[in-house]
Amino acid sequence: MNKNIIIGLLGIILIIILVNVFYKEPQSIIGNEEVLAEIDRLLVPLSQEAITKNDFDTLSELTKNDEYTKQEVKELAALAKYEEYSHIGHGLTSLHDYIKTGEEEICPGHSLAHYYIFIRHVEERRAE
C-alpha cells in the first residue's frame, strides 16, 4: 500500500511538472515590443507609398490571438489593396497607441471613412 501511494504521488508530481513546462499562458498584446517594432517597420513602405497587403503578413501573425488587433490589421491590409495610404497611416497610429496603452481610440470618422472606402470599392462585407 505504501508503495502505491508513493507511485501515485510521483505520478502527480510528474504531471504538475509537465504542465508547468509545456503550458504557456497567452501573452497580452498590450505593451508587446515586437508588435510595436513591426508597426514601426511598416512605416517605411507606407512612407514610400509602396505598402501592400503582403507587408502585413508578419503583423497579422503577431496579432492573431487578439481579436481587436486582428480585425484592425485585416482592415489595414485591405486598405493597402486600394492604396489608401493616409487611412493606413492613421490606422497604424491608432493600432500603435492601442498596443502601447491598451486603450481603444474612439474615432467615428475613422470607421466611417473606411466604411465609404469599402462601399466605393464594392466590398459591402468589409464595410459592415
Image: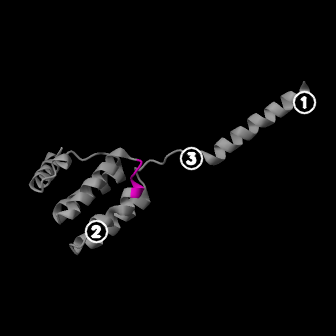
Apparent side of residue 124 relative to residue 54 in the rendered image (left or right)? left
Which quarter of the image is occupied by the C terminus? top left
Q: Residues within 10 Å of mark 1 (few under 14, many from 20)?
A: few
Q: Nearer the viewer, residue 101 or 115?
A: 115
Apparent side of residue 78 relative to residue 62 in the rendered image (left or right)? left
In this picture, which residue range is highlighted in magenta? 61-65
Q: Which of labels 3 and 1 is toward the front? A: 1
Q: Earlier in the sequence, mark 2 or mark 1?
A: 1
Can you identify the residue that label 1 sits on? 3
- Identify the element where label 2 is drawn: helix
Can you identify the residue that label 3 sits on? 24
Q: Is residue 36 visible?
A: no
Q: What is the distance, in whole Å, between disc 3 and disc 2 at their CAs?
A: 32 Å
Dominant secondary structure, magenta: loop
Q: Residue at x 43, y 61 (%)?
A: 34
Q: Is residue 67 visible?
A: yes
Pointer 2 with pointer 1, Cβ within 8 A: no
